[in-house]
């Protein structure tokens, strides 16, 4: 078994060496000082034509234990090895007694445990902690609002209300949702999941068959019949490793946040491929604009038109049949119905 494991590791290393080097972006800088608010993807986009290959760019540096963790003040220097492969060497800023001393004469205070994230956290945070797509029927089995105190129908922040089907202890937190449309595969018609419109959060005051809760935050009006799901415990943002899927993926964009039909960079979309097709957080897919068929003016027959590359997305949360993806970059508007596929 040990020999087999060593052989597999050796083959993996050989495959990595055989892969073509990442292509540098025209006009790339030779060095870059990491700024607060940067992301790993954004930094890689300064150097590479395909930013998702940023792992290929980092050079082993004894000053950095984890290449995923770079901080504001670090200086990234581009080098080209004897094998012709570009590498980024990180010159770590010294950290003394809670202060960051940059390589330049300037000194500024920065938190020590805030490494640069892979993705813009604000764009994806709501989709990490709230199940905005659920299996068909999941919400039907959840708790629900029966009405507000003093028979109020429309509820908002600080409103107290009654609910049934809620299990928990005083102080437990719940998210409030309204049932949305069922998402179906555009080709087969298979139901893939159900959208859940997030309305706000509530805190359980008094458990029981008719429980009492108070709304602690609200993004819209809450009504009798709206559903409650337990809020998951707070967790640190995950670290993503951008990479192509291990399997050949071809799917479509099913929906976009807010019900819009076209989106741009740093906006979230739902695609009709998930864990059962081999997708996982960190997988990168290219986006191809599908112009649809056209009619030939001479033959009068309909014919398909070629797909045009329009952007790149990265999966950050995968469900069984669906995934959330963040559009990392786009050269044109990205539309619901566009094709997503494994990078070439």
Image (cartoon, grey):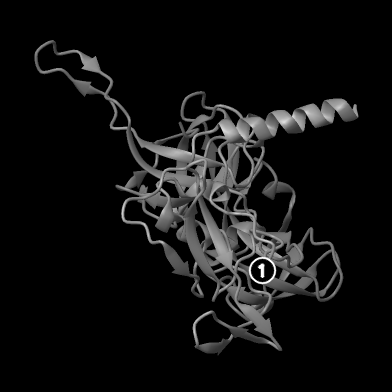
- Residue 309 sits above or below residue 222 on the image: above
On the picture, is 307 further left or further right than 131? left
Q: Quadrant of residue 292?
A: top left
Residue nearest the observer in this picture, 280 or 169: 280
Q: Which residue, given by chain and number where applicable, does mark 1 sit on?
A: 147
On the picture, is 111 further left or further right than 205? left
Q: Residues within 10 Å of mark 1 (few under 14, many from 20)?
A: many
**Measuring 85% from the left and 70% from the top, which residue is drawn there?**
207
Position of the C terminus, as image quadrant, is top left
Answer yes or no: is residue 226 visible: no
> Residue reaching furthest right?
1
Answer yes or no: is residue 306 visible: yes
On the picture, is 19 further left or further right than 12? left
**Measuring 42% from the left and 43% from the top, which residue is drawn there?**
23
**Measuring 76% from the left and 28% from the top, which residue is drawn there?**
8
> Residue reaching furthest left?
298
Q: Quadrant of residue 245?
A: top right
Residue nearest the observer in this picture, 176 or 85: 85
On the picture, is 31 further left or further right than 289? right
- Residue 208 sits above or below residue 335 on the image: below
- Residue 41 sits above or below residue 187 on the image: below
Residue 46 x %, y %: 41, 58
Position of the N terminus, as image quadrant, is top right
**Element type where label 1 sits in the image:** strand
């Amino acid at each position: 078994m040990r020999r087999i494991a060593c052989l597999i590791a050796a083959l993996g290393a050989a495959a990595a060496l055989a892969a073509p080097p990442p292509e540098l972006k025209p006009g790339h800088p030779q060095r870059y000082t990491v700024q607060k608010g940067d992301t790993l993807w954004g930094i890689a986009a300064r150097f590479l034509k395909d930013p998702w290959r940023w792992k290929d760019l980092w050079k082993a540096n004894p000053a950095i234990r984890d290449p995923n963790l770079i901080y504001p003040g670090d200086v990234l220097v581009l080098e080209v090895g004897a094998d012709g492969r570009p590498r980024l060497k990180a010159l770590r800023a010294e950290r003394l007694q809670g202060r960051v001393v940059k390589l330049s004469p300037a000194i500024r205070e920065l938190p020590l445990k805030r490494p640069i994230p892979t993705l813009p956290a604000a764009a994806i945070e709501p989709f990490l902690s709230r199940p905005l797509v659920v299996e068909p029927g999941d919400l039907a089995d959840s708790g629900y609002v029966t009405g507000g105190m003093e028979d109020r129908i429309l509820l908002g922040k600080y409103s107290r209300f009654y609910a049934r089907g809620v299990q928990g202890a005083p102080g437990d937190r719940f998210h409030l949702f309204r049932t949305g449309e069922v998402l179906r595969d555009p080709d087969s018609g298979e139901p893939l999941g159900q959208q859940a419109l997030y309305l706000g959060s509530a805190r359980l005051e008094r458990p029981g068959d008719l429980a009492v809760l108070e709304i602690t935050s609200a993004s819209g009006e809450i009504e009798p019949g709206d559903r409650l799901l337990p809020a998951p415990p707070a967790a640190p943002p995950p670290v993503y490793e951008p990479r192509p899927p291990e399997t050949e993926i071809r799917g479509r964009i099913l929906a976009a946040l807010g019900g819009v039909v076209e989106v741009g960079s740093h906006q979230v979309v739902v695609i009709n491929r998930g864990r059962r097709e081999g997708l996982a957080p960190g997988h990168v897919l290219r986006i191809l604009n599908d112009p649809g068929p056209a009619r030939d003016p001479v033959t009068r027959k309909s014919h398909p038109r070629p797909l045009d590359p329009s952007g790149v997305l990265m999966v950050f949360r995968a469900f069984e049949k669906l995934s959330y993806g963040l559009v990392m970059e786009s050269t044109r508007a990205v539309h619901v119905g566009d094709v997503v596929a494994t990078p070439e």
